[in-house]
Amino acid sequence: MFQRLFSLLFVGLFMMTASVLGQHSHAHPHSHQHQLREVDFPDIPGYQTLSTDLHIHTVFSDGSVWPDIRVEEALKDNLDAIAMTDHLEYQPHEEDIPHPDRNRSYEIASGEAEEEELIIINGSEITRSMPPGHSNAIFLEDANALLVDDARAAFREARNQGAFTFWNHPYWLRQAEDGIPPLSEMHKELIEGEMLHGIEVVNMSRYSKQALQIALDYDLTIMGTSDVHGLIDWDYETQHGAHRPVTLVFAEEHSKEGLKEALFDGRTVVWKDDLLIGKEEYLVPLINESLTVAGSSYISDTSVLELNIENVTGQKFILENLSGYSFHRNSDVITIEPYHTLTLEVRTRQRLEEVALPLRVLNAVTAPDKHPEITITASSIL
Amino acid sequence: MFQRLFSLLFVGLFMMTASVLGQHSHAHPHSHQHQLREVDFPDIPGYQTLSTDLHIHTVFSDGSVWPDIRVEEALKDNLDAIAMTDHLEYQPHEEDIPHPDRNRSYEIASGEAEEEELIIINGSEITRSMPPGHSNAIFLEDANALLVDDARAAFREARNQGAFTFWNHPYWLRQAEDGIPPLSEMHKELIEGEMLHGIEVVNMSRYSKQALQIALDYDLTIMGTSDVHGLIDWDYETQHGAHRPVTLVFAEEHSKEGLKEALFDGRTVVWKDDLLIGKEEYLVPLINESLTVAGSSYISDTSVLELNIENVTGQKFILENLSGYSFHRNSDVITIEPYHTLTLEVRTRQRLEEVALPLRVLNAVTAPDKHPEITITASSIL
Amino acid sequence: MFQRLFSLLFVGLFMMTASVLGQHSHAHPHSHQHQLREVDFPDIPGYQTLSTDLHIHTVFSDGSVWPDIRVEEALKDNLDAIAMTDHLEYQPHEEDIPHPDRNRSYEIASGEAEEEELIIINGSEITRSMPPGHSNAIFLEDANALLVDDARAAFREARNQGAFTFWNHPYWLRQAEDGIPPLSEMHKELIEGEMLHGIEVVNMSRYSKQALQIALDYDLTIMGTSDVHGLIDWDYETQHGAHRPVTLVFAEEHSKEGLKEALFDGRTVVWKDDLLIGKEEYLVPLINESLTVAGSSYISDTSVLELNIENVTGQKFILENLSGYSFHRNSDVITIEPYHTLTLEVRTRQRLEEVALPLRVLNAVTAPDKHPEITITASSIL
Amino acid sequence: MFQRLFSLLFVGLFMMTASVLGQHSHAHPHSHQHQLREVDFPDIPGYQTLSTDLHIHTVFSDGSVWPDIRVEEALKDNLDAIAMTDHLEYQPHEEDIPHPDRNRSYEIASGEAEEEELIIINGSEITRSMPPGHSNAIFLEDANALLVDDARAAFREARNQGAFTFWNHPYWLRQAEDGIPPLSEMHKELIEGEMLHGIEVVNMSRYSKQALQIALDYDLTIMGTSDVHGLIDWDYETQHGAHRPVTLVFAEEHSKEGLKEALFDGRTVVWKDDLLIGKEEYLVPLINESLTVAGSSYISDTSVLELNIENVTGQKFILENLSGYSFHRNSDVITIEPYHTLTLEVRTRQRLEEVALPLRVLNAVTAPDKHPEITITASSIL
């Protein structure tokens, strides 16, 4: 019953934040309905936006919780899907949980989520030295069948089961001491053999632009995951409105099949801290749906346009003005806080029927250090 | 006695803010000593940094408070100096306060601040139609002497008294309907005649890059003021840690004379919301003093450097990475929250004795849309 | 436009408060519509509840603000009425505001509030040494007429104008060094002569149970006021949801006449910090309307009743259980936080159709140290 | 590294709380060192105050976490000791964790806490139908030996191992449908046979004054526990500064032996939400150490004494004035917020050398509905 308290509290604090930052902005009228730990992005044209965490551990490998906690965490975070991906080969709890069925954390989580809309996906982490390092195979039918000596054989079995497989934390310092993904011939073979379909550009608190470049070069699906072993709340400060890394997946339907098809088709955006990472074709529509014009009019008989831009998401946006117009309140770099409406004043020099503002989104990337551009358009002003 | 409560509360909330924004950062150990409404910037090499608000009204023109409130507000905001600048020619309270001595608000405020370090400056707003519009003359000996018909005569009298005079809100929509400062021949004459020395690039909630360009073109001192008529607390949301616009003045000493000399010499940076505006020669040293390296070391035996950057101010910084190194946690645009230390992880590819990170400061400008560059250097790492 | 932000913020913080205090409670569904600085009590049967502050100063005596600020403060606090009560005899600003019309702060405030529902009342503080000390006469026609040498004559003039007059801070340490109201023969004469109708039991941060006893003994109206000279926001920490002392007046109509009639009839409750003070006949109905049953049912097939008590006000209530039933979660002393619903579990030993819970309200007084009793009744439970 | 943030944040919010409640109080100078979720009570004369939670579940019975999480939770809560008390007879995870050694959760937690001062105690919940219902036996040498058919035999074995045994949630609705502990002959026999030494008066969110009466009647140790199965953070809202129920134990030394001896000797106070429950001989010294006089002096030359009472704990105190003096700011019921100093003004009618204030503590009980009395004394005032 404390749910509402959290919601109001965190939104309240976010509002204070915006105020502290000195923006002229006001709260989204429905903002009190959101908890900030909840992932909450709009759909984009043609697709539903599903929020997912596809890399998760439990007591069935080296995690510290029973699978029911993973389901509750996902519900608190408003996720659409999680994959249970305990290590196949690494079993530090085997003294107490001997020879576990490798589908077990999936089975228990599925039972726990039976009455929920949350999708539970069966997966496993193929846990090998480099190459190929660690990879997650998800949408498995029987994870036990991947328990084989040869790494390539495990990937083949995953492919045979129709799994979607992605390279985990390719820049992990224990397997890459300079933090640069050591892309090997074996990885290229797996990719060519359709046994490796995605790559984590975000794992836990790390982001790798080199991993992003590999995703673009080899047409791999861009992935971001929590890789949680302990508690989401402790690792990601959810009580303060922070969030675990998620992969937003643009699916034709809210189902396991819809999700799988979208992942194989590479329709993802990763959200880590206040950074959005994805291909332009999905990232730009997502930001377009996130920021909308909430009214525009000229101030009395001047040529200064008051333009309200509403951010309907729990993510802030840092924007650079690329238009020829200057702002009457702001410099060329502006921030729109979560669930707020920013009032821009735009000096258009004459009163116009329509004003288009091209903006660069500085806290989003479509390639290493490359920021997407959007256009905010106010029409029928006069 | 509630002072300490505020302090701790606001700092606590700012800390939450940083956490919400998902940065890996931690609080400045002495941050609980600051109230966020307090203006708090470090000195720069060679100069003391004095925080000032040099455009203020009281009941002695069209303001709504007795001068004592202005002194208390300034003390709460930790300002070093304020100028009392009631309108000379506009006296809407004259029915109740007939023919006031135009030095009166200065006199009362001075009495109120007698035991404080706060510097009170005698000033007046020369209130004319455009050109020249409104201007503040400060450091006056007798404001009454400026009460003359001819505008030019008023400016001459100010000069004769040794006043520092600046053009107020040159982009005010009532006097400039496109929001662009209507620089006139009269303004140029006043500048040439050494009767106009500064220009507000910030007044209340407005910022004008065109006014900044005029400041640069004509070597005018860059000014920012509150122009408060009601209450600072209500106009600038101080209870949420927001702040009035201030002019930071880099003075050789904490005195009226030091302040005056610095203003005539153009040594200022304006702070409005989360934006810093100033000439590169003052803005870059200010940011250099604001952000310091608080430890750096390589992560175990990797070539990834953990670099702690401490922000000792109540102002956040949005920075763009201009170095050839990539970050292990962040994209190329990073934010360092007020009074926090950000832990960057830098992939230097090999272990280096010294690492220099050039960074562009996106929420600071030295000219219209031009952002200063600083360099953070970690030395003697190995 | 920041109004909504405040509202949500403060309510959010209040919710956190309740949570911190460990109560099982949840937020009022409409709580986000309230700003905690707003005085917000329900009407009682037969009367509207008007919130008032009837002791206020401006620059027209020894206050520090123009009357417009007093109107804005009252609007922020959601008051129904304020009285402008500048000192008649004490004029420290006379050098700048010479010989003011003693009706002047009333006139200016009235103009400022013209479009508002806020009622502005003309008053004056008759400022004398003890006896009779200081008194406010309100609902004056012409305050100037009270400017006479003889104190009694001033009271007579007030009576002749139909004023309601009350004794201010009778326990003021400068006029009563033991903090006990020095009730004199002169006071008794004024009361008998129908020239003194009320007494402040609360002034600023002070409460006097001895003043309350005088009110009860002499049938004087119970009054509480801010006596503000500086800023309400600074004196009463409104940014943290605290509030000025107010007199709640139970009036037949929302008008100056309704208010005056109610004051002469003694229909008041004073609200100071978290304390309510008033005669039982008004205080008990007020608390009854403040706390309502929001659902009750037995837990499965047990004889433990879950009883939800909703607090619809911004005031907490500390309650002592006087019933024969014990609580399954709480001791005999419970707290219901502002805008929250507390879930009590009551062990009724058998399943009953109706349960009546007599409760003593420990943070309310009807006489010195005497706390009112209310009864919460859950009906038609089975 | 976010630890400090939490600390400052929560204390900041608590400070706001106190301000909201309108008390004249100020923060404890060291309050920023405390996290509010941390249990933090002072020692009492002759004893150390150890905070404990002696009823805890893990995946080794019907809990949802590995034992390491229980250790981390206890460290976050600043506990001195926890007992691992998985059900002996109830093993819903047996399919995955077959035939577990009943000492296993203790062993794993002990390993996890090896480098910590946290004391881990081996225990088991003897899980039977009523009578005797559920009981915890702690300080076991081998929990497996209690796995016997006959309930009495299990208690005997516990006694033979030197265990301290207490009756769990005796008012559990599933075993007591009116919420009243069904004290049976079997319980009396166990008590007489020195096989039952304590009783939970608090379990999870429930408090039973009837259980407290049984503790007093039969000289059982007063116990309060979390009985946690899921996450402490979720069940007890630690992020908002709320806390799990704990048993404060007054021990001669910080050791397993010291704790055991104190429990057998009945030296405990239970802390649940904002309620303290214990025998007068321990509860009164605890409150005496919690509230201290932080300065007292007469206001100028009056007979009103300013008396500062400092609350050094994270627990608020609601106090009733039993003295003959009245307060100049407060009614007879006052609240002192956590980590705050309340400034009382006491009307002593004459200036005294020493003032003693007897106070009843309304949020503490020494018996059903019986509140302890303390005396605050200000000495050497003049």
Image (spheres, coloured by chain):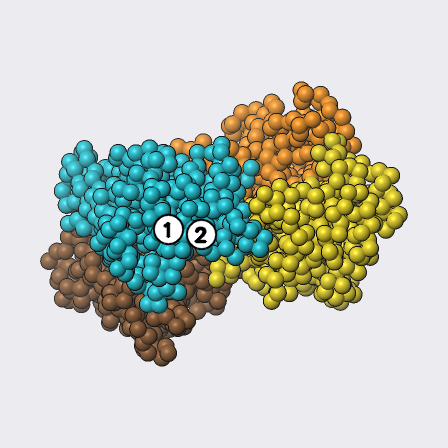
Chain colours: A orange, B yellow, C cyan, D brown
Q: Is residue D225 left or right of residue B331?
A: left
Q: CA distance from mark 2 to mark 1?
A: 10 Å
Subunit ID for the residue under disc 2: C
Q: Which class describes the residues within 10 Å of circle 2: few (<14), some (14-19), or many (20+)?
A: many
Quickly name the residue at label 1. Answer: C154
Q: Which class describes the residues within 10 Å of circle 1: few (<14), some (14-19), or many (20+)?
A: some
Q: Amino acid at mark 1?
A: Ala
Q: Quadrant of residue D95?
A: top left
Please provide percent x and percent y for residue A296.
64, 27
Residues at discs 2 and 1 in contact (Cβ within 8 Å): yes
Quickly name the residue at label 2. Answer: C88
Subunit ID for the residue under disc 1: C
Judge by depth and name the residue closer to the eye, C164 or A317: C164
Judge by depth and name the residue closer to the eye, A248 or D131: A248
Residue at the (45%, 55%) spot, across then down: C89
Q: Residue furthest left?
A: D185
Residue at the (25%, 67%) spot, across then down: D323
